[in-house]
Amino acid sequence: MNRAPASAAATAAVDSSDATASAASADATASADWVNSPAPSAWEELVTAALLGTERRTPPGREAPVALLDAAAVETVRRRAGLRAVRAAERPQPAPEDPRPPLPAAAARRLAMLLADRPGTGGGRRGTTPDLLELLPQWLAAANARGYAPPPETVPALLDAARGRTDLRPAALMFAGPRAVWLARLNPDWRFALRSAPGGGAALPPAQEPDRVRQLWQEGLFAERVALLGAIRAREPGAARELLATTWSTERAEDRLMFLDSLRTGLGPEDEPFLEQALTDRSRNVRATAAELLSALPGSALAARMAVRAGACVAVDHTRGTPVLSVEAPHQCDAAMERDGVVAKAPAGRGERSWWLGQLVEAAPLGTWPGRLGGRTPRETVALPVTDDWQGELHAAWCRAAVRQRDAEWARALLGSPSAPEAGGPGAVSLAERAKLLGTLDGDERAEWVAGFIGTHGLSEAFQLLGVCAVPWAAPLGRAVVDALNIARDAGSYPWSFSGVMGLAERCLDPSEASRLDGLLAIPDEREDASPGAGGYWAEAFQRLGTTLRLRAAMAEELGAQ
């Protein structure tokens, strides 16, 4: 009676053992099959299983992680060993020679330091270390002015720097020279160099070969055609205009706009017939650009038409105790005005009449106003009161006209005195307008005006104005900036409010001003109403400024650009 159960138990154990062995054998076989599977997407399947986890994407077999690793090992060997031999690719042509003289050794070492610098990833205190990456544009400008060629091993780093900063590209590619284009053809990450270089680095045909010029103009890529037109325009403005006329009617609207913009270089009375024809273009943007260019020609027929229209809107009213300017804005925008570039539809928030008035006054030659307004000078004209709250609109239009026509006398009148109580002259409607007006003055006059502005109003509104001043800043402007920073420090505020100005000073202040900063390096006694720790921050900022100025002086000496 006891043997039967024992026999049954033994039989069951044997059966269970056989089943376990069979299952293990099946698992091993399935795992081996999975490992040896030659499916084309085997590697992608393995990656998917690893990413999702073997619990969600289970390979055959109970030891899923082990099977996955085995399969990955086999597939790795297969991928490495399963490549078929192919014919070797043709070797690239050697890089072209750069005929420019090489950098001096000290300047080459400095370039490597500038390119190795990387912007910080965190905020907080900058400390006293100069921002080398911000000095790279200035270094490149000096090196290009001296006509140096870079060490070949630095060209890849130059391309990487230009790839990350579009503002750096023109100077970086000019300095990198022909090797930059050669490398860009081998690395798609640097393909922007091919787009930035005229014709992808190919030499433009000379003007003495009209057949090649005509062929490139008719068959070249858009970038090549823009570069060709610009190059010819710089040498022979008339030839460029005639070349453009040969295909003008068949060009796309966006291309016509770009080509028309190239006529700004060397713009003259000879361009008027072509621009008059462009006033009838199908594209509104093309018409507007043509009208803008014509209005920059004081003797053009369009300028004369605009002078008549604008003159009908502004007059001197002598019926009051003192002369005032009366304004009667247009009541409609007719077809002739639209043809001459006046945009009929006003932007949101603008009245139609004031919108039309501004466009007419902006396009009218400034030289017509003395005859219209009693022979008054620009300064006398701007000083006249304007009726019915039209002063802002009228003066803003004169500002735009002065900038467009590069009229320094009108710009001075509209800027007014830099020490005016309201931070600008009567015609300066915004800091942006003042900055544009300053651009019409020569460098010394511009710096003197901004220095006077800072001396009266401080640095809080001076950032945009400093940006249009020539580098390095003239001595009066540099002194005004340092004095204003010192006043801000003494007031006990944090220097972060002036970080933009401080950054400009590091790049634009004359290096000779470094010695004036030595007296500002000490941490001042903290006033009761001062921000906690502000003195220490200011000491760091002035030390960094002084270090940066001395570094810039060393850079100039290394490049021989003293």
Image: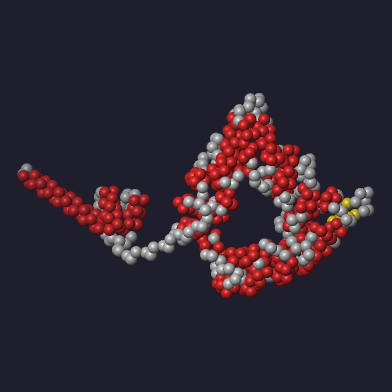
Q: Is residue 395 left or right of residue 171?
A: right
Placement of 53 over or under 267, stated as above or below: above
**Quadrant housing the N terminus:** top left
Q: Looking at this view, is 302 or 429 the one in front?
A: 302
Q: Is residue 314 left or right of residue 87?
A: right
Q: Position of residue 420 (x, y in %)?
A: 79, 42
Q: Looking at this view, is 2 or 178 the one in front?
A: 178
Please indicate, yes or no, whether residue 184 appears anywhere in the rendered image. Answer: no
Please indicate, yes or no, whether residue 456 appears anywhere in the rendered image. Answer: yes
User: Residue at 69% across / 40% down in the picture?
Assistant: 475
Placement of 377 over or under 6, stated as above or below: below
Colouring: secondary structure
Residue 206 location, quadrant: bottom right
**Quadrant housing the C terminus:** top right
User: Residue at 55% across / 35% down in the picture?
Assistant: 128
Q: Position of residue 361 (x, y in %)?
A: 79, 58
User: Residue at 67% across / 30% down in the picture?
Assistant: 490
Q: Is residue 553 left or right of residue 382?
A: left
Q: Position of residue 189 (x, y in %)?
A: 47, 56
Q: Is residue 353 left or right of residue 206?
A: right
User: Residue at 48% across / 53% down in the picture?
Assistant: 155
Circle count? 0
Q: Position of residue 185 (x, y in %)?
A: 46, 61
